[in-house]
Image (cartoon, helix red, strand yellow):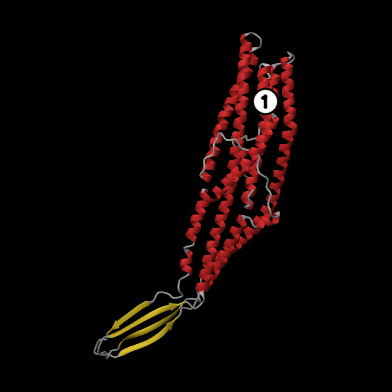
Amino acid sequence: MRIGSWYDRGVAKIPRRLVAGCSALLVCGVSLLPRSASADTAPEPPKVAVGTAVRASGTSTLLRELIALARARAPEVMLGRSALTASRSSYAAAELAPLGNPSLEVKVDHGNMGVTKDVTVDASVWLPVEVAGEKPTRRREARDYVGVHQALLEQARAIATSRTLRAFGAFAVATARARVVEEMLGVARAEADYFAQRLAAGDTTERDAALASLEAARNEALLSETRVDVLEHAGELAELTGRELDTAGVLDETPPAFTPKRATPELARAMPAARVLEAQARYYASSRERLKREAYHPLSLGLTGGRGDYGEARIGGGIGYTWPLFRANEPERARAEAERRRSLDELELRREVVARRIALLEHELAELERTVEIVTHSALPAATRAVQAAVETNRAGKGDWLTVLVSRRDLSALSLRRLELLDRSWLVLADLVEMTGELP
């Protein structure tokens, strides 16, 4: 499963809308500075809400544009289109006339011992004519061969759409994460300077100043790593769509809803992989029929003419036919039939597996949305209150800086965990699109 392999990477790819958690971090962090600075930096909730709505609308439009570009320009789509064009060359064989190449045979002989008077010349022209209806079977096989490549092209488009969703989601999450970490870094640097000044004045301990400096360094390293992720996903999107995205842009990291127009059994029956297997089964059936017809060899019509031993003209005709008694394309027909059965067996199996898989992924996507809601509306506000309480306790001289740092790290971990859940939602959505071919 792609999700599992993605999480096995050494570093988690943390995405998105850390805006709520980030705002809390800013308020709590700047609260250690003079109160006037804290009041000036406090975010305004109404503006954030409006910005989020605008961001969601613009992101949805951009995503639709990128999907359209990927379905036309992605490498797998271009290769599939090229293969489809090449497959149409099979129509040339389908339109061949039911006549074979004529053959000319000339014989000259002369007897010895005076038995024959002159040289005997015998010439014959043979023209093979198909009489078993091979041409219609060739035409049907060519049509089904092209149909296989058309289905493969549709499957390539579904894969390109899935890859674009996956890359776009990771890009949106990485850019959001970069903005959040930048704000966290600004707070951490301000705190480090603040504690350095207090340490110089003898108003704090070396440990608290060192912890503040360590937090700033940790966020700086996290920001550098996040910028690498942004560049990586922007490059993947450029490879898929041919369009360069602004790495400093503001995108909505929430994935669109998966709302298919068909029920799950219908999605499993009409999925791109199923259409490919159906097309393959038709092609192998057509190929088997063509091989069966071609087992009956063409009838050869002959015209003979020449000169006899006494110089007289000799004209005649004849027919020739090869009976398919011992060889009638049995190995080729058996292979075509076996491939047809394999395609149908795989089709049945995939439909059953994919139907279950789609239902599971839809349930997983719903649970992820529910988890994000819990983290956003319950866990993050509680963690924010914990940070505020720790800061106020520390400023009152009743607690140490380590408590503030631990509380803030809990808030940061929750915020980043929320982004991980959103990123995983993008992955699940991409898998659903690849399997079903449905656009989000």
Q: Name the amino acid, label 1.
A: Leu
Q: Position of residue 146 (x, y in %)?
A: 53, 62
Along the viewing direction, whichever of 322 and 230 lies nearer the viewer:
230
> From the viewer's perspective, is 221 left or right of 419?
left
Along the viewing direction, whichever of 353 and 339 lies nearer the viewer:
353
Q: Position of residue 128 (x, y in %)?
A: 43, 77
How many numbered dots are placed on residues in this image? Answer: 1
Q: Name the secondary structure under disc 1.
A: helix
**Residue 376 seen:** yes
Q: Quadrant of residue 43?
A: top right
Q: Position of residue 87 (x, y in %)?
A: 49, 61
Along the viewing direction, whichever of 208 and 186 lies nearer the viewer:
186
**Looking at the image, residue 197 lies above or below residue 439:** above
Q: Quadrant of residue 140?
A: bottom right
- 10 Å neighbourhood of mark 1: few (<14), some, or many (≥20)? many
**Looking at the image, residue 274 lies above or below residue 251:** below
Which residue ends up furthest to the top in the rendered image? 202
Q: Which of the image's four quarters has the N terminus?
A: top right
> From the viewer's perspective, is 120 left or right of 433?
left
> From the viewer's perspective, is 378 left or right of 311?
right
**Looking at the image, residue 181 lies above or below residue 148:** above
Q: Quadrant of residue 303?
A: bottom left
Along the viewing direction, whichever of 308 and 30 lies nearer the viewer:
30
**Residue underneath mark 1:** 25
**Looking at the image, residue 386 lies above or below residue 319:** above
